[in-house]
Image (spheres, rainbow, N blue to C red):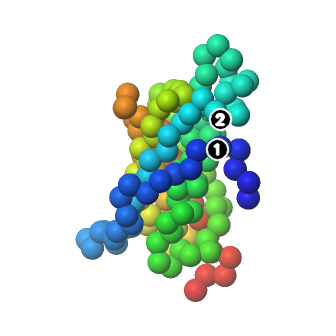
Amino acid sequence: MTSPVLAAPRVVREPARDEDSGAWSAGFSVTITGDEPVFAGHYPDFPIFPGVCVMECVRRAAEAVMPPGAEGARLAAVESCRFLTAVHPGDELGIELSWSPRGEDWRCAARVETERGRAASIRLRYRREDPA
């Protein structure tokens, strides 16, 4: 799958399992530069990184570090998505992921922040093609 977003997520906190909850978590950083093609038309005099592109950054981060048991899972649904503040060229997105099993599916909850505070809350559901 080709991404419309040039910026690549970088791991800043390695995946780890919380022994109490069983959830897996990891941290990422994404630098949003003015080179993103979407800025040409969104909006020329006041560039805003679209929410769908923020969601794409989360998807790419999530698929970079799937927890054991979720390998090979594919995005099945966007359970929820809430955008709280605009993202602009020069912003650094901090993405905190938390993975938890949901029956045969996996939920990936993301908290996205910029230096101005929380930018988005996103929940994705992943499903394995042939559950183990």
For image coordinates 56% across by 41% down, the residue present is 54
Instruction: Tell me the quadrant of the picture where the C terminus can be found.
Output: bottom right
For image coordinates 64% across by 44% down, the residue present is 6
Between residues 85 and 40, which one lies in front from this camera angle? 40
Tag 1–tag 2 contact (CB < 8 Å): yes
86 displayed left or right of 97: right
In this view, which residue lies farthest toward the bottom?
A: 132
Question: Cα distance, mark 1 to mark 2?
Answer: 6 Å
For image coordinates 68% across by 76% down, the residue present is 129
Residue 121 in sight in this render: no
The residue indicated by pointer 1 is 6
Res 17 quadrant in image? bottom left
Where residue 9 appears, as percent x and y from the top left, is: 52, 51
User: Sequence-wise, which precedes: disc 1 or disc 2?
Assistant: 1
10 displayed left or right of 7: left
Between residues 98 and 9, which one lies in front from this camera angle? 9
The residue indicated by pointer 2 is 36
In this view, which residue lies farthest toward the top?
A: 45
Amino acid type at circle 1 is: Leu
38 displayed left or right of 11: right
Where residue 36 appears, as percent x and y from the top left, is: 65, 35
Secondary structure type for disc 1: loop
> How packed is label 2: few (under 14 Cα within 10 Å), some, or many (20 or more)?
some
Amino acid type at circle 2 is: Glu
Secondary structure type for disc 2: loop
For image coordinates 47% across by 32% down, the residue present is 91
